[in-house]
């Protein structure tokens, strides 16, 4: 396992847990908040800064290429999406099923879908793989962009002169 992959898995799990804690806190503290996703994205940006800075110092010995920051962001977001998707599925399935009922109503109101397409869409809502796949995709994109922005500020590439030191 490469250091980048190991780093992404560990910090992806931390990111997933942090996002779940923020989501739970918002659920209890501000249940009527219009856009709670903004708080989650702000947490993602702050954690992305700390994760990229730590990756730069611990894995890359003080250097960071933009491509490395983007790869770490993509893998970290994917790992976080697995955790968030699975927990969200458990929440929707067993704790608050009103979300699924609202989605069922929306799907049934859609006049563009045939009955078979409606049945397939409703069946997908009850699948844990659907929730995990959607969350993995969403958080991978958000993390990719966040780590890209942070990587632009923290990048420091090796020059050709630093690799070729003159031997005495």
Image (cartoon, grey):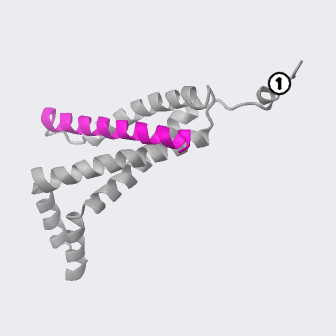
Per the image, the residue denoted by label 1 is: 165
Main SS category, magenta section:
helix
Q: Is residue 16 magenta?
A: yes
For the point 54% across and 40% down, which residue is it? Answer: 4
Quadrant of the frame with the C terminus = top right
Magenta residues (range):
1-30
The answer to whether 122 is drawn above or below residue 51 in the figure is below
For the point 56% across and 43% down, which residue is it? Answer: 2
Percent across and percent down for residue 110 are 20, 72
> Helix, strand or loop at disc 1?
loop
96 left or right of 46 in image: left
Percent across and percent down for residue 54 are 50, 27
The answer to whether 104 is drawn above or below residue 141 in the figure is below
Residue furthest to the top: 168
Q: Is residue 152 magenta?
A: no
59 left or right of 115 in image: right
Residue furthest to the front: 1
The answer to whether 14 is drawn above or below residue 85 in the figure is above
Percent across and percent down for residue 60 are 60, 31
Residue 114 visible to the viewer: no
Percent across and percent down for residue 25 are 19, 33
Residue 53 visible to the viewer: yes
Which of the 4 image quarters holds residue 166?
top right
């Amino acid at each position: 396992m490469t250091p980048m992959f190991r780093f992404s898995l560990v910090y992806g799990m931390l990111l997933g847990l942090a996002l779940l804690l923020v989501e739970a806190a918002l659920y209890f503290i501000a249940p009527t908040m219009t856009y709670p996703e903004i708080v989650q994205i702000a947490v993602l940006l702050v954690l992305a800064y700390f994760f990229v800075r730590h990756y730069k110092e611990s894995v890359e010995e003080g250097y960071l290429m933009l491509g490395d920051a983007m790869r770490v962001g993509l893998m970290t977001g994917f790992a976080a999406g697995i955790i968030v998707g699975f927990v969200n599925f458990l929440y929707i399935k067993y704790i608050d099923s009103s979300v699924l009922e609202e989605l069922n109503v929306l799907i049934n109101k859609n006049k563009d879908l045939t009955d078979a397409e409606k049945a397939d869409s409703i069946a997908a809502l009850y699948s844990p793989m659907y929730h995990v796949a959607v969350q993995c995709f969403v958080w991978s994109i958000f993390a990719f962009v966040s780590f890209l922005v942070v990587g632009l500020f923290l990048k420091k590439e090796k020059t050709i002169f630093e690799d070729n030191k003159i031997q005495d």
